[in-house]
């Protein structure tokens, strides 16, 4: 019994450490360049995924749309860790300094965007106005972030 308990504990600790290791991609092991390029890639991926969500939801393929929404939700959670203090400048970042000055609100916006995507998976099929629902739960978050936290281009 004790051996089984010890082995289960070791397995649990091992997997917890693995998860923690990969949950913080913006750790000190990554260079500033890798972090900035990584966050830009995730935002770009979410944008292209959002366009796909709109296309497939408009065609009534709600299962595919939901899968993409969940992917976007996870990306928003990950993005919170992609803004350490040392990544405010360089490598063509479009992030404005207010992100770090107002970090709590920025993080809350990323969390809200993630939560809204999950909510969207619950209501999209029953929506009479798919475009309006997508605007409220998906595109509005993009606009809120870009208007305050991203340099215009």
Image: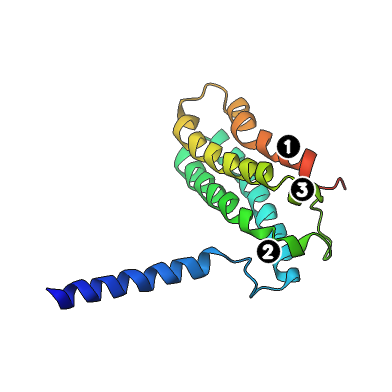
User: Left or right: 90 with respect to 145?
Assistant: right
Residue at 17% x, 78% y is 3
| x and y, in percent, of residue 109 in the image | 64, 41
- The answer to whether 70 appears left or right of 5 in the picture is right
Tell which tag, 2 or 3, sits nearer the viewer.
3
- The residue furthest left is 1
Which numbered disc, 1 or 2, marks the residue that appears first in the sequence?
2
Measuring 69% from the left and 58% from the top, which residue is drawn there?
A: 83
Q: Is 137 situated left or right of 98 in this image?
A: left
Where residue 108 appears, as percent x and y from the top left, is 62, 42
Q: Which comes before the other along the chain, label 2 or label 3?
A: 2
Q: Secondary structure at mark 2?
A: helix
Find residue 151 and report its horizontal and vertical position in percent: 84, 48
Question: Foreground: 53 or 108?
Answer: 108
Q: Residues within 10 Å of mark 2 (few under 14, many from 20)?
A: some
Kindly give the residue lying farthest to the bottom in the view shown: 3
Q: Residue furthest right?
A: 153
Q: Nearer the viewer, mark 3 or mark 1?
A: 3
Tell me the CA gap for discs 3 and 1.
Answer: 19 Å
Q: Is residue 127 above or below residue 89?
A: above
The numbered mark at residue 101 is 3
Q: Are marks 1 and 2 in contact (CB under 8 Å)?
A: no
Q: CA distance from mark 1 to mark 2?
A: 21 Å
For disc 2, the marked residue is 38
Percent x, y for residue 13?
A: 35, 71
The circle drawn on residue 143 is 1
Displayed quadrant of residue 28: bottom right
Separation (CA) of disc 2 from disc 3: 21 Å
Dot 3 lies on which element? helix
Q: Earlier in the sequence, mark 3 or mark 1?
A: 3
Q: Nearer the viewer, residue 49 or 11?
A: 11
């Amino acid at each position: 019994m004790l051996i089984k308990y010890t082995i289960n504990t070791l397995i649990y600790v091992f997997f917890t450490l693995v998860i923690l290791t990969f949950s913080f991609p913006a750790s000190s092991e990554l260079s500033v360049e890798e972090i900035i390029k990584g966050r830009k890639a995730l935002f770009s991926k979410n944008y292209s995924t959002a366009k796909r969500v709109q296309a497939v939801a408009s065609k009534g393929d709600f299962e595919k749309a939901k899968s993409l929404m969940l992917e976007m939700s996870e990306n928003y959670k990950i993005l919170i860790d992609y803004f350490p203090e040392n990544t405010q400048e360089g490598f063509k970042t479009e992030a404005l300094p207010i992100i770090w000055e107002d970090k709590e609100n920025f993080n809350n916006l990323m969390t809200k965007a993630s939560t809204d995507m999950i909510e969207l998976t619950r209501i999209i099929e029953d929506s009479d106005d798919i475009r309006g629902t997508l605007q409220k739960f998906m595109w509005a978050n993009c606009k809120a972030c870009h208007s305050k936290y991203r340099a215009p281009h």
